């Protein structure tokens, strides 16, 4: 009787309990020799003990070239977060025919839905009206809503056109938005085939009433939305940051929002958890949420289903069909947490 394939389960602590449910554990034990590690990154000793036999890794295990060379049976590395970890030699994995997969498509619908909510909340001044009501300073009717503006028929800019943007675009169709995109990885012809306008970063920042920052951070674009670029943003626009904080000068971004240069919703931060003494915690005119835009049971259910579908495929000797495959040269640039 053939031995079961070895699956090494080493997910990020924040995601572990949402991905490794009793049903998942039961099936994985039925179809594989399952080795699990929770609470932190797996120790070097534990990884080395299993590296020669492992066929699928689920999690954020470090896989440089020298370790990939030892993993003679490895078929796939599945990241149940939504980014590309910087501790994998993507080019070497690609050469060896090892799939490197991300759960990004599973989270994108929930994040996109949150983006619409953030945009409407900002443009309608919901947070400010809420705070005034708590202080018994509210005004009624148009007197309390005079600075509001609508998402309908508005000019909208996307920075990045990946999973998040592709999930957000159809949600904006009922609002009849004019959508432009800055994404240097994609051709003008491709973007226009998707029904959006390809523009430069400067034009996008200066000509749109709503700007969604949707791009992942790489070694090439880290901090590229700098102080000078932020000052191009049209006065009183609504800026929604949901991808990675490192893509911009975060301190400057917050300062300009505090000074009412634009309205801002922020779901991601340079350091998480955010320090308790962070100065921006005191600001009431910025809509802050604690990296929860995609954190829904619905999203994790999607991750579990996609993950298990692809594990079954891979163990049958077939290619994965649900999770996102890494493009090795682009993934190599990723510098996500």
Image (cartoon, rainbow, N blue to C red):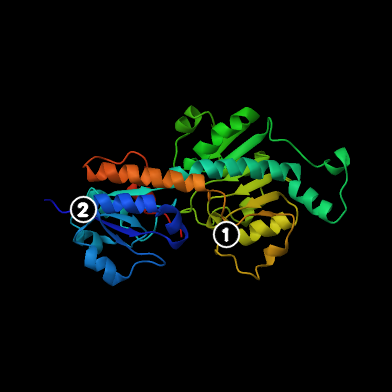
Q: Position of residue 61 (x, y in %)?
A: 34, 61
1 or 2: tag closer to the N-terminus: 2
Residue neighbourhood size for the residue with mark 1, other residues' Cα within 10 Å, grouped as few (<14), some (14–19), many (≥20) = some
- Residue 175, image x, y percentages: 65, 30
For this rendering, which residue is in front, 302 or 63? 302
Q: Is residue 295 left or right of residue 76?
A: right
Q: Which of the two marks, 1 or 2, is nearer to us in this view?
A: 2
Q: Residues within 10 Å of mark 2 (few under 14, many from 20)?
A: some
User: Horizontal and vertical percent for residue 234?
Assistant: 70, 44
Residue 328 position (above or below residue 153): below
Question: What residue does disc 1 label?
Answer: 269
Indicate the secondary structure of the residue bearing disc 2. loop
Q: Which residue is mark 2?
A: 5
* Mark 1 → mark 2, Cα distance in angstroms: 39 Å
Q: Going 15% across and 54% down the picture, which residue do you hit?
A: 3
Instruction: Note whether residue 77 is visible.
Output: no
Looking at the image, residue 50 lies above or below residue 1: below
- Mark on residue 321? none
């Amino acid at each position: 009787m053939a031995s079961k394939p070895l699956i090494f389960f080493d997910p990020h602590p924040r995601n572990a309990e949402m991905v490794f449910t009793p049903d998942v554990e039961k099936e994985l034990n039925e179809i594989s020799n399952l080795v699990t590690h929770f609470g932190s990154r797996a120790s070097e000793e534990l990884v080395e003990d299993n590296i020669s036999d492992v066929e699928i890794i689920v999690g954020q295990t470090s896989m440089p070239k020298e370790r990939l060379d030892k993993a003679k049976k490895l078929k796939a590395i599945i990241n149940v977060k939504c980014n590309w970890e910087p501790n994998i030699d993507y080019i070497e994995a690609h050469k060896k025919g090892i799939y490197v997969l991300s759960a990004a498509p599973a989270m994108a619908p929930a994040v996109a839905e949150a983006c619409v909510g953030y945009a409407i909340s900002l443009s309608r001044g919901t947070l400010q009206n809420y705070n005034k009501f708590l202080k018994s300073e509210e005004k009624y009717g148009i007197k309390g809503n005079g600075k509001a503006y609508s998402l309908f028929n508005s000019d909208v800019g996307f920075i990045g056109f990946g999973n998040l943007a592709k999930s957000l675009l159809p949600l904006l169709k009922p609002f009849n938005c004019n959508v432009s995109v800055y994404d240097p990885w994609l051709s003008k012809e491709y973007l226009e085939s998707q029904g959006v306008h390809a523009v430069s970063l400067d034009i996008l920042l200066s000509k749109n009433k709503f700007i969604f920052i949707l791009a992942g951070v790489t070694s090439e674009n880290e901090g590229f939305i700098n102080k000078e670029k932020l000052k191009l943003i049209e006065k009183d626009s609504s800026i929604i940051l949901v991808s990675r904080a490192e893509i911009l000068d975060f301190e400057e971004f917050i300062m300009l929002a505090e000074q009412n240069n634009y309205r801002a919703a922020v779901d991601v931060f340079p350091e998480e958890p955010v320090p308790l003494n962070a100065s921006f915690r005191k600001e009431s005119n910025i809509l802050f949420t604690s990296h929860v835009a995609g954190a829904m049971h619905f999203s994790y259910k999607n991750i579990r289903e996609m993950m298990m579908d692809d594990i079954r495929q891979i163990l049958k000797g077939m290619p994965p069909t649900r999770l996102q495959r890494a493009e090795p040269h682009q993934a190599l640039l990723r510098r996500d947490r």
